[in-house]
Image (cartoon, coloured by chain):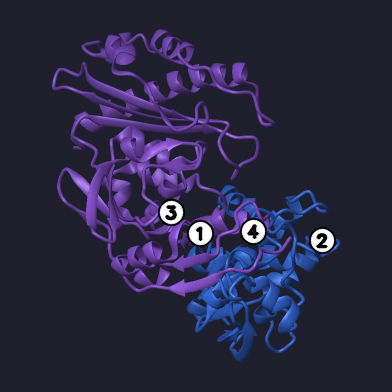
Chain colours: A purple, B blue
Amino acid sequence: MVAAPFGYQRVSSFEEAAAALRERGEDAKVLAGGQSLVPMLNLRVARPEWLIDINPVGAGPITDHGDHLRLPALTRHRAVEEAELVRRRCPILAEAAAHVGNVRTRTRGTIGGSLAHADPAAELPLVAVALGGEVTAQGPDGARDLPVDDLLVGFLTTTLAPDEVLTEVRVPTLPPGGGWSFLEASRRSSDWMVVGVAALVELDERGTVAAASAALGGVAERPWKVPAEALAELVGAAPEAAPLARVAERAAAMLDPDDDVHATGGYRRRLAAVLLRRALAEAVARAGGNRSPAP
Amino acid sequence: MNAPARQRIALTVNGERREAWVFPHETLLDVLHDDLGYQEVRYGCGEGVCGTCTVLLDGEPVSGCLLLAVQADGRALTTVRGLAPDGELHPLQASFLRNGAAQCGFCTPGMLLTAWALLEREPRPSRERIRRELVGNLCRCTGYSKILDAVEEHAAVAQAGGARARAGHD
């Protein structure tokens, strides 16, 4: 298959991108890493009149702001996966990036592109929801900040206006006493997840669970944040006595995933329970290691 | 929309400057294979999954089917021919031959380029690391184990050779 013809415009700033999007209207698409958009063009699933190529804008460095990291939207997955800063300060994000596609996908694909594409089986939207990340969107009339939770709506659908483009992603850093886990099940390594889970746990000075959060991917139209009440039973528990299996089963029972060619809904729900239990256990274990400073 | 016009692009392919007139919707794969004669860059899936169109863009592996040719303007590309510029096999290619790591050969350029790029970053990767890096290159003939053997053996030989050279025995 070959893509249908389209016009092509390079821009060198996000302001220019937003202006171009307003001028070109709904028939324009933003080209970032192109690892999802170009397959859709080649298969003619998408037929935009114009592509606005933002790659010339480039990505500045990933920076540490204490309680959060800032990543330029055009940061490639491989840079996220390999950056020492991300691995140390927000390791769950580096781990999620390492699971994206194959090495060529990671060489070109971008964090902003993944969030804006909003595939419900993609790794970075899942981990961004679990972390409570934020993005900045640039429009022709200015920029606005919004939580990733408010960005993602459903299958390939976001709250971005047709003339807005993501410029930056912010994610919280791992606190002292924090633990994390990112797990996914897929049919083939490098493939989309059938089900994925991102879990975060914090232990207090006494070593009991102070906070827990988690999100699941591949089980709904968008990454599903496990409701706080479903995890509430973990708070105050000693790690070895935390009722992880019960909590995970209860959370999974709230899901009603669709059947598709990859898996039945029932199998997805079962995977959700198993992976969530394992991820919570791994996060708790890592939190314990993180609480006591290395000698 | 008016029909988009062709644009002139200039590429450096295997160290050689090449020019082409391309439409925006043409992929780098189309232009390398159909217009510029690099038949070793092959169409497999058109979705970035199979790895037969792998080329190195400024030294990093990319899917030629997912990069627009206009995006490669001014960039340096390597196809598998670039590994053997004088027609003499690169030691990694020789290792593929020795190990029977190629049968029909369709996936081989992508395998070689991906493995070469890995070894540039990590001279002595574990077998598991090689397997993970090559996961996006599909082969229907060899069952993969001989490909892993070939990459592993080349890495070991290259490292031993480097150590000998450093010790002055070579």
Mark 2 in CB contact with mark 3 (< 8 angstroms): no
Of the numbered discs in the image, which one, if any, rests on residue B100?
2
Q: Secondary structure at mark 4?
A: helix
Asked whether B42 or A121 is in front, the reply is A121
Q: Mark 4 or mark 2: name the one nearer the start of the chain.
A: 2
Per the model, the C-alpha gap separating discs 4 and 2 is: 13 Å
Mark 4 in CB contact with mark 3 (< 8 angstroms): no
Q: Residues within 10 Å of mark 1 (few under 14, many from 20)?
A: few
**Amino acid type, label 2:** Gly
Q: Which residue lies at the image location 31% right of the left edge and 24% below the top edge?
A: A213
Evaluate whether residue B125 shows in this view. no
Image depth: mark 1 or mark 4 in front = 1
Question: Which residue carries the number 3 mark?
Answer: A113
Asked whether B116 or B166 is in front, the reply is B116
Determine if marks 1 and 4 fall on one subunit.
no
Q: Position of residue B24 (x, y in %)?
A: 58, 74
**Amino acid type, label 3:** Gly
